[in-house]
Structures are given as structure tokens and as C-alpha cells.
Image: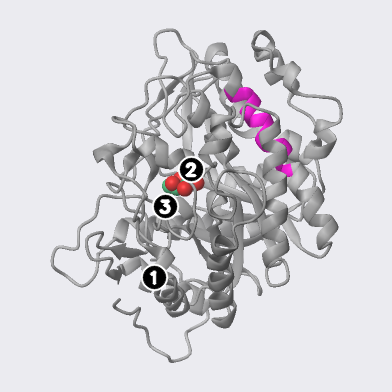
Amino acid sequence: MTSVQHSSSTPPAPALAFPAGFRWGAATAAYQIEGAAAEDGRGPSIWDTFCRTPGKVLGGDTGDVAVDHYHLFRDDVALMSELGLTAYRFSISWPRVQPSGSGKANEAGLDFYRRLVDALLEAGIEPWPTLYHWDLPQGLEDAGGWPERDTAYRFAEYAGLVHEALGDRVGQWMTVNEPWCAAFLGYASGEHAPGRREGPAALRAAHHLMLGHGLAVQGMRERHPDHRLGAAVNLYAISPASDSAADLDAARRVDGMQNRFFLDPLLRGSYPADVLTDLEELGFDAAVRPGDLAVINQPLDQLGVNYYSRFTVTGEAGTAGQAATSPFASHSPWVGSESVGFVDGGRPVTGMGWEIDESGLHEVLTRLHTDYPPVDLYITENGAGYDEVLNGEDTVHDADRIAYIDAHLRASHEAIAGGVPLRGYFTWSLLDNFEWSWGYSKRFGLVHVDYATQRRVPKDSARWYAGVIRRGGLPDHV
Ligand code: FCB
């Protein structure tokens, strides 16, 4: 591990200062970094199975070893310290805690998180665990997966086991990460595990992810009323390609499925009426039982916003398509709105092909503040993936990533100045890692990882971010 070098002299006051207590973090997820897939009793997850299914993940890559964080977590916490992170968002692997998805806890699995949390606390870094970042135990998928209502109850049970084990030392919790991806990439487009292509099942999966969130929050609230609880949703800014009626309707539909289908039940206790109309033929109503929405609509302390891009959409005939979330996209994830098309918005893109638009982040944050009941907001993911190489040097000159994060922090600052209760920013990601169906081909880290040797090398962005944290804000310009 090479270090993040910086001078120890007092930094100049930033031109754009963030409020005192603002959390400066980075995020990761269990399957993307831990490795140790068969250690200490961990059971298989849907991602282990998916990775072994030919043609699903680029290069046949798997998370078996990933960046071996399971064994190297102390080095990684040391890196976080050097960066000056005040908070670290990671996820807990459900199949480490419950190898087959139910029953008593596997203490050896929980011990890993006890060790990690202790190391973080010792380093003065606040742990921010997410309970579900897509690694459903395979045993539960075998029983039907998220489209089965019982999975929501299994999730709440698992959440309770983790909360009981770590709740004395961890007070910040996120339940589910990006339920849109888990439901619609997992069960409609099939680009993500478990790779099913069943629209109505995907809708039920979305509802059960939300229900699982609500049930888990109820249990956690009872156990530790002082804990701060929330969920992390992936929100997009959406623009119609033109002001034609068809394009405006496409924008309404994509906004409905991507943003409001999750925000409305979580924060208002209802599904959006226009979306329910779009879904009328698909039997979604039957999945929603009396009382479910009240369970989902638990008072939240915080909402995590994962923001990456803006979509420009069209409803004009002959343009059906989807924003590429994987190299293997073939089915639409837009259940009930399969004919919407995605067009080039004319912006520069990252190495993922995702359009860069920081104004969309400002728009999303401001909308949450004005349209929804008040809740503290955190950006729980934001960052840029590229195909990067070390080139024999001892760093990566990732000026594009610096520019991306800088622009989004400026947009965040502007939102705060406009009254939005944004309390923290977690960049995706601390380390290069397993980028789902893209395998190891896309790198999002502030820290480069050589996958053959596991050597960690901070990129230019790591030093830059450390400077932002040290100053508590941004200079006038990059
Ligand atoms: C998000 C995921 C995260 C990572 C980033 C790039 O959708 O939550 O795990 O893959 O995208």
C-alpha cells in the first residue's frame, strides 16, 4: 500500500465551505470487495450463482476474491484514515450472517463485521452499514426470491440479527440499496442476479424490498430508538427529448418507475396513482396488501441518494431502447413502459457511457426537499467509472474523476445554500472493485487495486479528496 501524502500545515479556508458536521465518506459493497466467498461459513448468494452462469458477467469474472477486503480490511481502514474520511459506507453480506437465508446467525460471519466496526471506531471513522446490497442468499432465491412475500420477512429477521450484534456500536443504518436495481435489473431485464426476465415478478420484488425495509425499520426502531435509519435509492434527473406529448409521457413514465415508485411509498405512504394506472394490466395491485403501505412508510431519519446521471427519454415510435446498464442488456427493465426510448442528451460521458450532469443532482436534491416531507439527505453514492491503467507509475492521473466529483460537490453545495438538508457525501467508491455484470473492467475507486497482487495505490483523486475533506470544502476552481 502506498500512502496518501499531504502536507500537515493548516489548510486555507475553502471558498465553498460545507457545514460543520458534514459527513465526508466513501462507499463500497460486500460482494464487490470482500472476496473470501467460501470462508467462515458464508453461504452462496445469487451473485455467486449468476457469475457462474456463462455469458452473464464480462470475462466470466466473479467476486470469489474481489479485492480481498475480508483479509485486508485493516489496510483499507488505514487508507480511509489517511484520506481523512469521517464516515464509511459498507454493506453486510446476508449469506455470511445467514448462509441459507434464515435461522440463527453464523457468528463467524458476524465476527468479521465486529472486527471491521471496531477498526473503524478506533480510527475515528463512523460506520454506515447497508443491510442489503444485492447479495440475496441463494437459498431464498431457490424459494422464489424477492417476488415472494416471505423474503421481506426473512430480510427483517436477518436485519434484526445484525442490528442486535452491532447495535451497541453502530448508530447509522441503511436498509436496502437501490431497490430499483435489485428488482428491475434482477427480475425484469435480467442483467443482474438472479437474471430473471419476468415483469410482474419484478414489480412484486420491488414491493417486497420496500416491505422488507419497513419491517426491518420497525424492529430496529424498537431495539434502539436513538439510531438513525434510512434507505438508499438511486434517483435520476429525467428530461423529455422534446415537448411532444409522447416524449412528455415517456418522461413521466420513467420518472414514475425510477424515482416516484420508491420515494412515494417510503416518504408518503402511497404508490403514485399514474404509475398504478400504467401497471393496471400486470396484477401489481394484488401484491399490495392492506397495511403494507403503512409499514413501508416508517418515519425515516435520513434518505440516501445515489446519483450518477440524467436520462433523456422519448416516447416516439421506433426508438425503444434503454440506457446501457450492462454489456448484456437485452430486455427492458421498464416494466409497463417497455416502449420508452433513451436518447443521447449530448453531454460528455464517463467510462460507463453515463452522461455527466451535475445539474441533475441539484435538481434531484431540490425536488426531494420541495415535493416530499422533510428528511435529512445524504448522497450515499456518486462517482465515475473508467477503464484505468497504472502505466508503470505509482499513481493514476484521474483528472476526469476529480472533475466529476468536484462538479457534483459544487452542485451539492448550491443545494445546501438553497436550504436542502444535505448532511453528507459518500463517493463511490473507496477502492476499484467488482462492477457487477461489467466484472473488473470498470474502475470507480479513489484507490487503484492491482487485482493480481491486491496492491492498493491511491489515485490523484484520493489526494484531491483528502484535501477537500481537510479544508472542509472546495477551492474557487479545480
Ligand atoms: C450503483 C451500485 C454500486 C455500484 C455503482 C457504480 O448502482 O449501487 O454497487 O456498482 O452503481
- Is disc 1 surrounded by few (<14), some (14 to 19) or many (20+) residues within 10 Å? few
Three-letter amino acid code of the residue under disc 1: Leu
Q: Secondary structure at mark 3?
A: helix
State the residue position of label 2: 45
Comparing marks 2 and 1, which lies closer to the viewer?
Answer: 2
State the residue position of label 3: 32
Q: On the picture, is 247 further left or further right than 54?
A: right
Image location of residue 138, percent across then percent down: 51, 38
State the residue position of label 1: 72
Q: Magenta: predominant secondary structure element?
A: helix
Quadrant where the N terminus lies?
Answer: bottom left
Tell me which segment is drawn in magenta.
202-213
In terms of depth relative to the viewer, which is nearer, 51 or 277? 51
Does 298 sit above or below residue 467? above
Image location of residue 371, percent across then percent down: 74, 39
In terms of depth relative to the viewer, which is nearer, 333 or 45? 45
Residue 331 shows in the view: yes
**Residue 403: image tag:** none
Q: What residue lies at 60% left-to-right and 60% top-to-bottom? A: 129
Three-letter amino acid code of the residue under disc 2: Ser
Image location of residue 241, percent across then percent down: 47, 23
Q: Secondary structure at mark 1?
A: helix
The answer to whether the residue bearing label 3 lies less than 8 angstroms from the nearest atom of ligand 1 is: yes
Q: What residue lies at 49% left-to-right and 17% top-to-bottom? A: 340
